[in-house]
Amino acid sequence: MKKLLTSFIILGAAMLLLTGFNLPQDAKDYTACLRKVNKKFGAETKLCPASSKPYKVWFVNDCNDTLAVKLAVQETSKRWRTFVRLQLLPGDTISGYACNSTGKYLYYAKQYADNSVELPSDEEINSSNIH
């Protein structure tokens, strides 16, 4: 009886280990791969020559996965200026800016080859209640 119980425990542990390595792709939060490395009010950008309050933010991909990333930086008008990198390689950086910024930003990420997940559209981001 003791051998049978030990066998069931070993079998159960093996099954748990095997199922743990077969997690579905969407189980990983790819936004956790992005680390903010810098932010700066007054950052120079040629696209905001008359701006009195430009803001720029930078993120790096800290994971070993290639990502598709959408970054949004909010203007004082409450509209979001968006930036997309469809293949952000491990160690690569994405940046975004707003000419007259609130200092708020959003970011979304997925594994770049995962066609079952879509990044939000600009319209979805701008119509959200995130202010």
Image (spheres, helix red, strand yellow):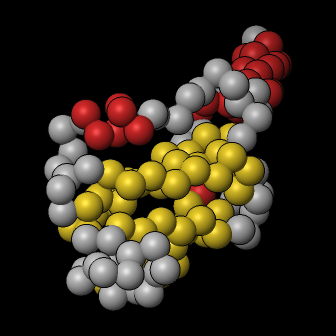
**Snapshot quadrant of residue 25:** top right
Number of marks present in the image shown = 0
Could you say where residue 51 lies in the image, as x and y percent from the top left? Answer: 29, 79
Instruction: From the viewer's perspective, tell me whether residue 121 is left or right of residue 76.
Output: right
Toward the viewer: 119 or 98? 98
Direction from residue 11 to residue 33 in the image, left or right: left
Q: Quadrant of residue 127?
A: top left
The quadrant the N terminus occupies is top right
* Residue found 53% across the figure and 35% down from its top: 119
In this picture, is 79 found above or below 7? Answer: below
Residue at 32 percent of width and 51 percent of height = 80
Q: Residue at x 69, y 46 (%)?
A: 86
Report x, y in % for residue 23: 69, 29
Q: Compared with residue 126, is residue 50 higher up or lower down, i.e. above or below? A: below
Q: Is residue 58 above or below residue 111?
A: below
Q: Position of residue 36 (x, y in %)?
A: 48, 71
Query: Which of the two residues, 35 or 107, is positioned nearer the viewer here?
Result: 107
Q: Nearer the viewer, residue 50 or 9?
A: 50
Whether residue 13 appears in this view of the structure is: no
Residue depicted at 75% across the width and 16% down the height: 8
Location of residue 107 with respect to 45 vertically, above or below: above
Instruction: Report which quarter residue 6 is drawn in.
Output: top right
| Residue 15, visible in the rendered structure | yes
